[in-house]
Image (cartoon, rainbow, N blue to C red):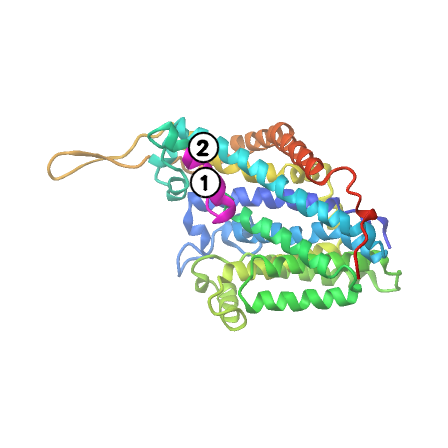
């Protein structure tokens, strides 16, 4: 068994690429909403970004599914390693602390990002986004409140609704944080329930839970986190397995096929799937096998990304590529990129996009002049803007990770130390039978 099978740095690289794809999906689909379909029109050929596999660059829902998959995978690794070694006495306290720590490490950075967006909103940073032609930027840009008291109350209200209603007016892309936190807690609860179950029995439980998620239309959370935990079990099966005399070619061909199949399926379009043969077949099949009211783009995204993670698990060369130091660094700042990209897109990117454009003026029948929306830059100008914006985004993300997220982590650790204490004396407690 190769030693690098025990190395999970590739997860950071995968997370880094996924965060980048979420940003590219938001920007490119906002600039051209036809990209959400598998072709420009019903009778036309797809553009480059609409082709299978390549369209993962703009498939934000598939990228989000990977985050949920990794939530199940990563949060299980340490615990599964300990319980497989019959060290439940150390695994369970670690699980309890991880559960408590997870809340602070998600809530505090998200609060900081919402607060920054709130400040930018009331400084007028989203004014161009509100005046532009691109509907997605307009819809995500809130209107400043008229008084300071109302603005402060509105900030507090949105900080609450982020976690209570999965809604945040100042940063609407944070809607999924509520579900990510819920997914983490489901992972911890499932691990707690199966702490004394054998690996084989735990896999059976996860399969049953996965089927339940499939049948109950819980495609975003249950299916992804169960698949992630199941793949974590397969990871340790792989680590513990003895070498076998199997043809290297046959070992590599199947994972590659699984990976490519997953990449095609995960790119299922959000709109007009019937316009292309491959997506039309998936639409027909999905209508038969998924819950009647399921969003097929999310359901197929979940299935496709699960196949992708399975393929990566059995492809050491791809793991080595994803373990490249630059990709690992991208993974370490991925949560920062996710948090800050929305307000930077609506401010800095829109300033670049609309900065030199003038609104279209039309003359009404009564002679009045109507000022229209600001037209965005097009073609080569957009490519130049993106080449400037993405390095700026990652530079800002690095600063955010170093100066904001790290402080939030320290504060969460301080709260954990105060709430849990360094010495809990749990070993002295006698539990009656």
Which mark, residue 118? 2
* Residue at (64, 66) in percent of width and height: 209
Q: Is residue 20 above or below residue 219?
A: above
Residue 156: say if magenta: yes
Q: Please indicate, yes or no, whether residue 347 appears anywhere in the rendered image.
A: yes
Q: In this view, does 329 lie above or below 187?
A: above
Q: Nearer the viewer, residue 97 or 200?
A: 97
Where residue 377 appears, x then y in whole percent?
40, 35
Which mark, residue 107? none
Where residue 389 appears, x then y in whole percent?
52, 32
* Residue at (75, 54) in percent of width and height: 315
Residue 353: say if magenta: no
Q: Nearer the viewer, residue 253 or 320?
A: 320
Q: How far apart are marks 1 and 2 (CA)?
A: 10 Å
Answer with left or right where residue 120 lies relative to residue 433: left
Question: What range of the chain is rendered magenta?
Answer: 153-173
Query: Crowding at label 2, few (<14), some or many (≥20) Cα neighbours within 10 Å?
Result: many
Q: What element carries label 1?
A: helix
Q: The N terminus is located in which quarter? A: bottom right
* Most common SS among magenta residues: helix
Where residue 111 appears, x then y in whole percent?
54, 36
Q: Does the residue at mark 1 contact the one at mark 2 (Cβ under 8 Å)?
A: yes
Q: Is residue 391 above or below residue 195?
A: above
Return the residue at label 1: 158
Q: In which quarter of the image is residue 80?
A: bottom right
The numbered mark, 1 or 2, whose residue comes first in the sequence reads: 2
Q: The C terminus is located in which quarter? A: bottom right
Of badges 1 and 2, nearer the viewer stands 1
């Amino acid at each position: 068994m190769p030693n690098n099978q025990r190395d999970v740095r590739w997860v950071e690289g995968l997370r880094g690429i996924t965060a980048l794809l979420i940003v590219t999906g938001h920007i490119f689909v906002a600039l051209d909403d036809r990209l959400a379909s598998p072709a420009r029109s019903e009778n036309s050929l797809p553009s480059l970004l609409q082709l299978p596999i390549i369209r993962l660059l703009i498939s934000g829902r598939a990228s989000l599914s990977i985050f949920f998959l990794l939530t199940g995978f990563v949060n299980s690794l340490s615990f599964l390693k300990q319980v497989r070694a019959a060290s439940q006495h150390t695994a369970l306290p670690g699980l309890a602390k991880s559960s408590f720590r997870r809340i602070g490490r998600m809530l505090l950075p998200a609060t900081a990002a919402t607060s920054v967006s709130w400040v930018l909103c009331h400084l007028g940073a989203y004014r161009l986004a509100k005046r532009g032609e691109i509907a997605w930027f307009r819809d995500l840009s809130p209107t400043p409140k008229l008084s300071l008291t109302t603005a402060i109350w509105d900030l507090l209200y949105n900080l609450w609704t982020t976690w209570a209603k999965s809604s945040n007016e100042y940063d609407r892309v944070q809607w999924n944080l509520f579900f990510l936190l819920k997914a983490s807690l489901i992972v911890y609860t499932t691990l707690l329930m199966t702490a004394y179950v054998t690996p084989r029995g735990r896999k059976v439980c996860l399969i049953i839970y996965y089927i339940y998620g499939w049948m109950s239309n819980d495609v975003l959370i249950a299916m992804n986190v169960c698949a992630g935990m199941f793949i974590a079990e397969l990871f340790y099966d792989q680590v513990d397995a003895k070498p076998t005399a199997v043809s290297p070619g046959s070992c590599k061909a199947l994972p590659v096929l699984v990976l490519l199949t997953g990449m095609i399926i995960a790119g299922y379009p959000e709109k007009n799937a019937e316009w292309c043969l491959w997506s039309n077949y998936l639409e027909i099949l999905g209508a038969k096998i998924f819950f009647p009211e399921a969003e097929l783009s999310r359901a197929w995204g979940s299935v496709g990304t699960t196949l992708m993670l399975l393929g990566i698990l059995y492809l050491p060369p791809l793991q080595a590529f994803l373990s490249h130091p630059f990709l690992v660094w991208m993974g370490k700042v991925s949560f920062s990129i996710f948090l800050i990209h929305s307000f930077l897109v609506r401010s800095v990117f829109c300033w670049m996009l609309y900065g030199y454009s003038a609104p279209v003026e039309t003359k009404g029948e009564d002679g009045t002049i109507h000022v229209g929306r600001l037209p965005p830059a097009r073609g080569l100008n957009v490519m130049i803007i993106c080449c400037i914006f993405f390095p700026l985004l990652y530079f800002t993300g690095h600063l955010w990770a170093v100066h904001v997220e790290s402080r939030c982590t320290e504060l969460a650790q301080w709260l954990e130390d105060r709430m849990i204490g360094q010495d809990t004396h749990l070993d002295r407690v006698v539990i009656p039978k």
